[in-house]
Amino acid sequence: KDLLAATGIAVSRSNALIGLTSVVLLPLCLVKNLSSLAPFSLVGIMGMAYTSIAIGIRFFGSAYKPAGRFLPDLAPHMQPAFGSTGALGALSPKSLILISMLSTAYIAHFNAPKFYRELKNNTMDRFKTVVTSSFSISVALYAIVSAMGFLTFGSAIQGLILNNYSTNDVLLSVSRFAVAISLIFSYPLLFVGTRDGLLDLIRLKEEERTNSLLNQVSVALLAITTVLALKVTDLTFVASMSGSVLGTALIFIYPTLMFRAAVKDNPTNGQKWERRLCSIIASLGVAIGGVGAKMALHSL
C-alpha cells in the first residue's frame, strides 16, 4: 500500500494484499525447485543492501532531525521521540520483545536439508561455509541497520521502519520497492518449508506428493495465510509473538532436545557436559519465550 502510495496510486490495504497474493506470490509458491529463484534472491540481497545504505544516509543526514526537510511530512506519532532511559532500557522486560523478534530473523532450520541438497557441489564443508558466512553477514547487517533506525526515530519507530519515512522521500521510496522485491522472492522459501512441514506432520511419503497435490496444498495454505494477513495488521505483534512462541522453540528448545535424544545412549564425557548445557539452553528458551509472549500480549 505504502509503495503504491509513493508512486501516486491510491489503493486499500486489502486490495493490495489480495492482488499481490494472486498475481505474484501464488505463482512463486507453486515453483517446485527453489534453485530457480536464486537469481531473484540475489536481486533481493542487493535491494536490502541498498536499503541499508539509504537508512544510513538518512541517519547521518539531517532530513528527519528538527527543522529537517522531511519532518513536516510525518504525522505527530511518527516523528522522532527520545526519552532519558538510555542503555538501562536493555534491562527492561520489554527488551524481551526485541529478543523474540530477533528469533524470527535467524530461523532457517526447516529449509536446511533442502538447501543442502540443492547446493552445488554439496559437501559438508561447503555447506558450513555458506551457513557461517551468511549468518555472520546477517547479524552485522541487522545490528547496524537496527541501531541507525532507532537512533533516527527513537520510540516512534514502527514495526516496519520504512513506514516512518516520508512518502516524498525518493531515496526511501526506492527502498520500499527494493524491500518488496526482497520479501516477495524470499517468501517462497518460508512457504515451502511450511508446506513440506505440514506434509511431514501428516506423514505423507515423498512418492505420494504429486505435483497436483502440492499445488492444491499450496493454494489452500496461501489462502489461509492471506486471510490471516487481512485480519492482523500489527507487524510488531506478529513478529514478537511468533518469535517468542515459535522462534525460541526452533532455536533454543527443539535442537537441544534433539541433541539430548541423539546421544542419550552411551554418551562420551564431553557429550554428558553438552547434554547438561542443552538443558540450560532449553530452560532459557522457555523463559525467554514465556516472558516475550506475555510482553507482546501486553503491548496490544
Image (tube, rainbow, N blue to C red):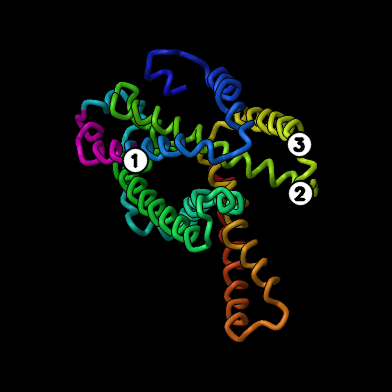
Q: Can you say whether 135 is above or below 215 in the image?
A: below
- Whether the magenta-drawn stretch holds residue 59 is answered as yes
The region drawn magenta spans 51-68
Residue for badge 1? 49
Left or right, 162 with respect to 269, comes to left
User: Cα distance, mark 3 to mark 1?
Assistant: 38 Å
Q: Earlier in the sequence, mark 1 or mark 2?
A: 1
| Front-lying residue, 135 or 230 | 135
Number of other residues with Cα within 10 Å of mark 1, as a class: few under 14, some 14 to 19, many 20 or more = some
Q: Residue at x 62, y 82 (%)?
A: 272
* Numbered disc 2: secondary structure: helix
Left or right, 261 with respect to 104, comes to right
Give the percent coordinates (x, y) of residue 35. Answer: 54, 41
Q: Residue at x 34, y 27 (%)?
A: 174
Give the percent coordinates (x, y) of residue 75. Answer: 36, 26
Mark number for residue 201?
A: 2
Q: Quadrant of residue 74?
A: top left
Image quadrant for the C terminus? top right
User: Cα distance, mark 2 to mark 3?
Assistant: 17 Å
Q: Earlier in the sequence, mark 3 or mark 1?
A: 1
Mark number for residue 210?
A: 3
Q: Earlier in the sequence, mark 2 or mark 3?
A: 2
| Front-lying residue, 39 or 185 | 39
| Front-lying residue, 225 or 295 | 225
Give the percent coordinates (x, y) of residue 26. Answer: 61, 27
Kind of residue indicated by mark 1:
Ala
Assess whether mark 1 and mark 3 are in contact (beta carbons under 8 angstroms).
Answer: no
Kind of residue indicated by mark 3:
Thr
Number of other residues with Cα within 10 Å of mark 2, as a class: few under 14, some 14 to 19, many 20 or more = few
User: Which marked residue is nearer to the observer: mark 3 or mark 1?
Assistant: 3
